[in-house]
């Protein structure tokens, strides 16, 4: 009798343990797809997307101020954002792939998607291809919605798409100290011009002037990243601007990239509208990040901090363009 009770107790315990294991297994299976999605999203480097999102918002804001509410197409606006951001994400994935293949990324790198085998090379290639396809589908809808000529939109779009690939793929502009020039052009003038043209149907070259603060601030993100990685980049034989000019000059350049936009806003605020002083709210944070840049111990986090600053700084700039009584060189009172 006692043995039966013991056996029964052991069987009950075993069954309970088995049930618990099955429950845990089912729970893990349910979590697995979510973890995979999270992994893919992380591979897109979402913290960097302000570099393409904010110029697109700025171009749309200038178009809104130019044409007014009744001529502003919100569906065109959404497809413009979708198209630009997906191509940017694809470029990030391409960057991850080629940095790994060329032996640049290691255990100390900021992006360890392939280094830590979080995703396989095939998965990264597939993700990049899907993102480029998604961007092209978005562009097709944009062509249908936008009043701009097909050839004009295509020239800017495919110029941006090819640049996102050539940054590290193909000739690899990043590896021959030309990445900085590409970033200044794409994540500034081109993105703003593309968003403006998609809404209005024509080119307004003065939008490039408005893109300068964002282009400089975005270049500050890249330059801080290259300065941080200068030693490891040098070991694998690639050349960046940060390597060419050295630490002291890199700091001076970073400070210029970070603070020149604020000087521009003061000039615009004093001469045209106080609304342009709105981004000055982020100036104290810029000084904190500049201080971190000077310290080797805190330099590692500067690129992400600069990207975060870029987002808030950029949104306030867009709001300023909405609120200003006039946009110099574009609108009249």
Image (spheres, grey):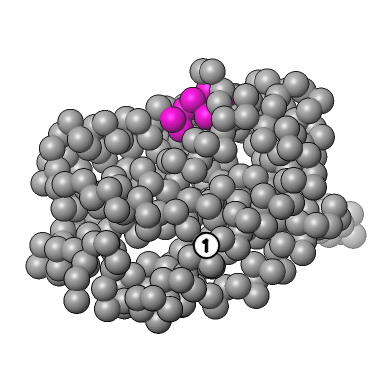
Can you name the residue that lies furthest to the bottom here?
274
Taking 177 as reference, is 212 above or below it? below
Question: For the N terminus, which image quadrant?
Answer: bottom right
| Location of residue 55 (image quadrant) | bottom left
- What's drawn in magenta, residue-wise? 163-169
Under circle 1, the secondary element is: helix
Left/right placement of residue 75 relative to residue 279 reads: left
Q: In the rendering, at what x and y percent does residue 197 appear? A: 22, 48
Taking 171 as reference, is 50 above or below it? below
Q: In terms of depth relative to the viewer, which is nearer, 260 or 33?
A: 260
Left/right placement of residue 217 relative to residue 128 reads: right
Q: Residue at x 63, y 25 (%)?
A: 175
Q: In the rendering, at what x and y percent does residue 105 appear? A: 72, 31
Q: Which residue is mark 1?
A: 261
Q: Residue at x 40, y 27 (%)?
A: 162
Taking 142 as reference, is 6 above or below it? below
Q: Residue at x 32, y 43 (%)?
A: 83
How crowded pointer 1 is (Cα within 10 Å; few <14, some 14-19, many 20+) is rated as many
Q: In the rendering, at what x and y percent does residue 129 appear? A: 42, 27
Q: Is residue 107 visible?
A: no
Q: Residue at x 61, y 59 (%)?
A: 258
Question: For the C terminus, which image quadrant?
Answer: bottom left
Can you name the residue that lies furthest to the top here?
170
Q: Is residue 126 visible?
A: yes
Question: Was residue 109 drawn as part of the magenta stretch in this picture?
Answer: no
Taking 192 as reference, is 126 above or below it? above
Q: In the rendering, at what x and y percent does residue 180 appear? A: 57, 38
Q: In terms of depth relative to the viewer, which is nearer, 166 or 277?
A: 277
């Amino acid at each position: 009798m006692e043995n039966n009770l013991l056996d029964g107790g052991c069987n009950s315990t075993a069954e309970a343990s088995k049930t618990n294991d099955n429950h845990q297994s089912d729970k893990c299976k349910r979590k697995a797809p979510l973890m995979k999605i999270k992994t893919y999203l992380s591979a897109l480097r979402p913290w960097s997307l302000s570099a393409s999102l904010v110029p697109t918002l700025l171009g749309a804001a200038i178009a809104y101020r130019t044409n007014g509410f009744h001529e502003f197409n919100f569906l065109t606006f959404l497809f413009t954002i979708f198209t630009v951001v997906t191509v940017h994400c694809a470029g990030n994935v391409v960057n991850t792939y080629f940095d790994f293949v060329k032996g640049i990324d290691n255990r100390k790198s900021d992006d360890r998607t392939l280094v830590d085998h979080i995703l396989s090379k095939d998965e990264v290639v597939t993700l990049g291809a899907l993102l480029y396809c998604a961007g092209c589908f978005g562009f097709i809808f944009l062509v249908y919605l936008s009043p701009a000529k097909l050839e004009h939109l295509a020239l800017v779009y495919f110029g941006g798409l090819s640049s996102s690939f050539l940054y590290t793929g193909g000739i690899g502009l990043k590896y021959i100290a030309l990445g900085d020039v590409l970033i200044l052009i794409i994540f500034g003038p081109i993105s703003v011009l593309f968003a403006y043209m998609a809404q209005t149907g024509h080119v307004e070259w003065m939008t490039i002037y408005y893109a300068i603060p964002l282009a400089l601030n975005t270049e500050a993100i890249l330059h801080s990243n290259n300065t941080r990685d200068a030693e490891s980049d040098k070991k694998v034989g690639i050349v960046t601007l940060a390597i060419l000019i050295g630490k002291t000059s890199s700091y001076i350049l970073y400070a210029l990239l970070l603070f020149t936009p604020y000087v521009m806003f003061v000039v615009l605020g004093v001469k045209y509208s106080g609304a342009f002083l709105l981004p000055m709210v982020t100036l104290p944070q810029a000084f904190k990040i500049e201080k971190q840049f000077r310290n080797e111990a805190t330099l590692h986090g500067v690129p992400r901090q600069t990207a975060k600053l870029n987002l808030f700084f950029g949104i306030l700039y867009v709001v300023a363009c909405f609120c200003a009584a006039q946009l110099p060189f574009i609108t009249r009172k």
